[in-house]
Image (spheres, grey):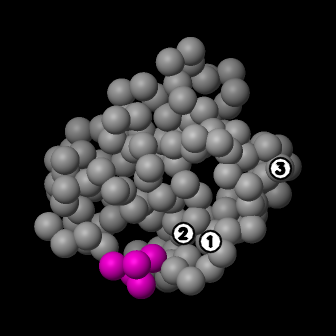
Amino acid sequence: APKPQADQRPSAGMTPDHVEPEDAIIHIAPKAMIRLRELRAQANDEIVLRMGVRNGGCSGLSYVMDFSTRGDILEDDAVDEYEKEGVVCVVDAKSMLYLYGLELDYSDELIGGGFKFFNPNAEESCGCGSSFGV
């Protein structure tokens, strides 16, 4: 299956202005970080994002992403701390296999906007951008 072209990525051509944790599991693209900063400012607290995969979606597996809390972080979870940004990414052990190296981007298009997932591990992705197959 064809991989998404770089020019389809909302943050194409932008340089990140944040520091990525060492051995980051999830890479946050510049536009996604801008959006996460906005959400953090609204929440007036750090943001804990739990990301994972579940069965379903057009291509067999779909992404799940939700707000969480530090209290919900489990021993087996992998944690990326963006300390300066007040952003924490948490991935459960089972999803780790599928999400390692994933790039999280953000599109502000009116239709089809929102957080986008670009997964180097996906053999096939579908147009909705939230489902993939391996």
Name the residue beneath numbered marker 2.
106
**Where does the image place residue 106, in percent across and percent down from the top left?**
54, 69
Q: Nearer the viewer, mark 2 or mark 3?
A: 3
The answer to whether any part of residue 88 appears in the image is: no
Residue 38 position by quadrant = bottom right
Q: Earlier in the sequence, mark 1 or mark 2?
A: 1
Label 2 crowding class (10 Å Cα cut-off): few <14, some 14-19, many 20+? many
Q: Are marks 3 and 1 in contact (CB under 8 Å)?
A: no
Name the amino acid, label 1. Answer: Lys
Q: Which residues are magenta?
A: 5-9
| Residue in front for this viewpoint, 57 or 90 | 90
Name the amino acid, label 3. Answer: Lys
Name the residue beneath numbered marker 3.
84
Cα–Cα gap, marks 1 and 2: 5 Å
Say what secondary structure mark 2 lies in.
Answer: strand
Q: Earlier in the sequence, mark 3 or mark 1?
A: 1
Say what secondary structure mark 3 lies in.
Answer: helix
Name the amino acid, label 2. Answer: Tyr
Cα–Cα gap, marks 3 and 1: 17 Å
Name the residue beneath numbered marker 1.
31
Image point (14%, 67%), residue name = 1
Residue 122 position by quadrant = bottom left
Image point (33%, 41%), residue name = 98
Taking 48 as reference, is 104 left or right?
left
Cα–Cα gap, marks 2 and 3: 20 Å
Q: Are marks 1 and 2 in contact (CB under 8 Å)?
A: yes
Location of residue 93 with respect to 39 vertically, above or below:
above
- 7 in the magenta segment: yes
Say what secondary structure mark 1 lies in.
Answer: helix
